[in-house]
Image (spheres, helix red, strand yellow):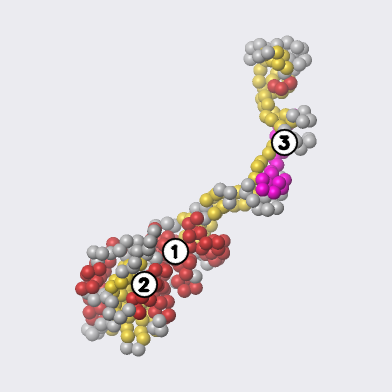
Amino acid sequence: MEYAKSNRAIAAFLQDMHLRGIKEINPLIANEVSYPELSIYFGDEVDKALEIMLKDNIVRGYVVDRVLKCPECNTMSIRTRYLCPSCNSFNVERVSLLEHLVCGYIGSSRSFKKSGEQQVCPRCGRVLRTVGVDWRVIGTTFECYDCGCMFDEPKVGHLCIPNGHIFDPTTSRYEPVYKYVIDEAVMRLVSEGHLINATVAHVLEKLGYRVQVDGVIKGLSGVDHKFKVIGFKGDQVIAVDTSNPSSSREYLMQMAAKVLDARPSKAILIVLSEKPLKDVEPLALTLNINLIVARNLAELEEVMLQNLSSEGKEEVEVPTKAE
């Protein structure tokens, strides 16, 4: 995969997602929409990275929500207000509609005067005594406290808190929020080690080697032995294979048989793992295979350069970074 060379951050992101078993990147919606998982790899260039990955079908976006934004300043810090359709006042309230069954008057609960704890009909002056007998609630409505208008539905208005911009649903920005799912075909390529192979090839080319990915070395027995990456420079031949942590011991034994017959100048087994493989290192040393354990692609490149620049070292331990 060319991303190991052209876009190292995307390659590191994909490899780490594979190692962590993560296929979806979900948004965090607060005062803004962000993707903390992506920020680790791309910093302030998350939008640019997503644009590239969407264009190249590395990820696919799916709408999971929508957010309201100010059309002037793009902020999501917004207060929504109900407005009177007659005078545009925000001083409105939902009230109950009451019917006085004795005289037939219908009005908002505010229109019935108070007499102590009791309500008095504004038309006939009688006290409302028993609900369902002499009066009843027939519904709700909105009432404007400024102009007295009554209405079923208020207008909706928005106020931008930082800058005081006023707008309504017809002028607002109502934007989709996406989650991003890594394409299955891409994840399959990553799981098969293509990014690791490409990183190894990049390092070898950087050091002046002619590189073959999925190359073959003919052994002394005449059998062709396949390695994930082979580097050639002069009479030097470097053979590289990869393994996952759980099967690294078994793979070492298989690789040893190939190395014994193919006789490369140097044999390297690469394992990406969060933890060191202390139980495997002695076996690698015995089999004369350089074991490189790295936590990510960036570290792999660093340690490979160190390994290939150091004469006579049979294994390389990755120093633990300070927390």
- Identify the disc placed on residue 14: 1
Q: Foreground: 258 or 318?
A: 318
Q: Is residue 49 visible?
A: yes
Residue 66 image offset from top left, x and y in percent:
59, 49
> In which image quadrant can residue 151 be found?
top right
Would residue 283 be counted in the magenta stretch? no
142 above or below 250?
Answer: above
- Identify the disc placed on residue 303: 2
Work out which quarter of the rendered image holds the C terminus and state it: bottom left
Q: Amino acid at mark 1?
A: Leu
Residue 135 image offset from top left, x and y in percent:
67, 15
Q: Amino acid at mark 3?
A: Phe
Q: Amino acid at mark 2?
A: Val
Residue 116 image offset from top left, x and y in percent:
68, 13
- Identify the disc placed on residue 268: none
Q: Which residues are magenta?
A: 149-167
- CB contact under 8 Å: marks 3 and 2: no
Q: Foreground: 24 or 286?
A: 286
Q: In the image, 180: left or right of 287?
A: right
Which of the two discs, 3 and 2, labels the residue nearer the N terminus? 3
Q: Helix, strand, or loop for circle 3?
A: loop
Residue at (69%, 52%) from the top-left corner?
71
Which of the two discs, 2 and 1, labels the residue nearer the N terminus? 1
Residue at (41%, 62%) from the top-left corner?
16
Residue at (35%, 79%) from the top-left corner?
309
